[in-house]
Image (cartoon, helix red, strand yellow):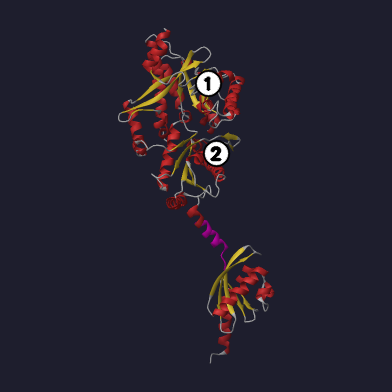
Amino acid sequence: MMPSTTLDNMAHWSAHVLDAMSDALLYVDGQGAVRYINPEAERALARNRSELYNKPLWESLPRLLGEVLRRECQVAVDSGKPHLFGAFYGHLNTLLEFRAYPDRSGGLSLLFRDVTQKKIAETRLRRLDHFDPLTSLANRPALFSRLESLSYFCQHHQQHFSIVFIDLDRFKDINDTLGHAAGDFVLVQISGRIAKLVNDTTFAARLGGDEFVIAIEHANETSALALAHHALAEITRPIVIASRDIVLSASIGVSVSDTDCQNGLELLKRASLASRQAKESGRFSVTAYQSAPRPDNLAPKYEREREIRRALELNEFFLVFQPQFQMSSGTLIGAEALIRWNHPERGILGPGEFLSLAEETRLIVDIGNWVIRAATRQIADWREEGLAPPPISINVSARQIFDGSVYEQTMAALEKHSLNGHDIVLEVTESIFLGSEDNYRSVLVKIAALGVPIALDDFGTGYSSLAYVARFPFSTLKIDRVFVHELLARGSSRSIVQAVIALAEGLNMAVLAEGVETQAQVDELSALGCDLAQGFFYQKGLPARLFATEYLISAV
């Protein structure tokens, strides 16, 4: 027989070990009374030993927890086997995980721990599997899974579904000028607006970057286009960042399942191509997928970038000149230099085919500087021929202004060809308002000091607040073609045009309408007080020789 002192020592050692356990431990006898409680159990239940010892466990705790423990412990006793269960402890707002180990006397040991943080972490990990952590919209894998389900359902039930592909325009400008924190804030705001469009038959996801997708069940092209236009209206509502009103636009593509295609991933590809077509047609628009993609749309991005670099080296770019008129008299008052690419394999390409990629790299600066040199050289060539060209408008990018090259390039070009500042006009877009106002303003002030007029292009579609317009040395506001196109169809566009004209008049600026295509638009613009215009109604962009023949030689 083991000496009593040894037994006492072992009992004392066992109690010390149980008290030091990181898990909580209770022993409950056959009548439900607590016969042992270690310090961790006191902490986990927020009860001290005197509140529980020798008292019925189920009655010593809050009713809901006590009922769960009574029921689950009885399961363990009846089965005679260990039993695992969980219980929510509302008093501490914690989730407890219990293991009940019955013994032959009818009592049991309850080993338990607080697993709240563990469960929260597991929930977060599961959420990360299906949701975008920044925007809380569904993520790419969840979207692909949903498209697979939609494809299966529609194929077997002869139903249609649609894809709306949303690509934010010029979002990179926000990251580049305001920083990624501002960019993240904008994405969260846009995602919230997209989420409001979701109902029982729609599913919204962030595909990645600045691209979003809405999948719509039981939708034909008409209903999908209606939702796409609704999404565009939501996206274009101003977002306030650092007391600035930032207005985004988007290029949206729509595709609809049909007998030819019921595969979700293929429809996603089609909607993506349609959004690219919308971007190439001028952005701020919705386009339905209608035809197969052109080969250039499938070319690898790096290959197209290499082609652009080669085009600069081999002088494959050239300019066309679109005339600008005073509508009331028909007088030629200027022309805009527009870049074209004489691609050796694909023929003549417009700027929509390559400038988007150029804007993602420093190539836009190289191209922009080339345009300044080419336009001023053409003015000089015309003058050597004894012609008197009007002021030529040259588009410059925000990145050219940001790195300061536009001032040096402009000054050097004017000096090289002995031109005056007013022989050209520099056109900038509203994206300059995204960056450092002082930096951009100082560059434009220096350019204006050369005598070069500065026009604000695409006014009303971008990021400007009216307060910023007055602080920059603009001489002309150009009404974007989107508002001109919708001038007669939408009262809101007419109101915007009217407000721009009033603003220009109040700031002593000229106002010029872009994209004028019909006599009705000319009449309406004239009635509103806009007398300067350009567009296909008057003339498309013409090569230098043809422009001279049509408008300069006859004036000599």
Residue occupying the point 43% across, 10% down: 388
- Contact between marks 1 and 2 (CB within 8 A): the answer is no
Residues 495 and 545: in front is 495
Horizontal relation, residue 504 to residue 364: left or right: right
Q: Nearer the viewer, residue 75 or 507?
A: 75
Q: Amino acid at mark 1?
A: Ala
Label 2 amino acid?
His
Horizontal arrangement in the rendering, residue 216 relative to residue 465 (left or right): left
* Image coords of residue 525 (percent x, y): 55, 20
**In the displayed structure, would residue 56 be above or below residue 199?**
below
Instruction: Please state the horizontal and vertical placement of residue 191, each as a whole percent of the image.
Output: 54, 44
Residue 266 visible at all: yes
C-alpha span from label 1 to label 2: 27 Å
The disc placed on residue 520 is 1
Q: Which residues are magenta?
A: 113-125
Specify whether residue 418 is painted magenta.
no
Q: Is residue 243 left or right of residue 399?
A: right
Question: Looking at the rendering, which quadrant does residue 106 occupy?
Answer: bottom right
Left of 45 or right of it: where is 396? left
Image height of 130 relative to 534, above or below: below
* Number of on-image labels: 2
Secondary structure beneath dot 2 equals helix
The circle on residue 230 is: 2
Disc 1 on helix, strand or loop? helix
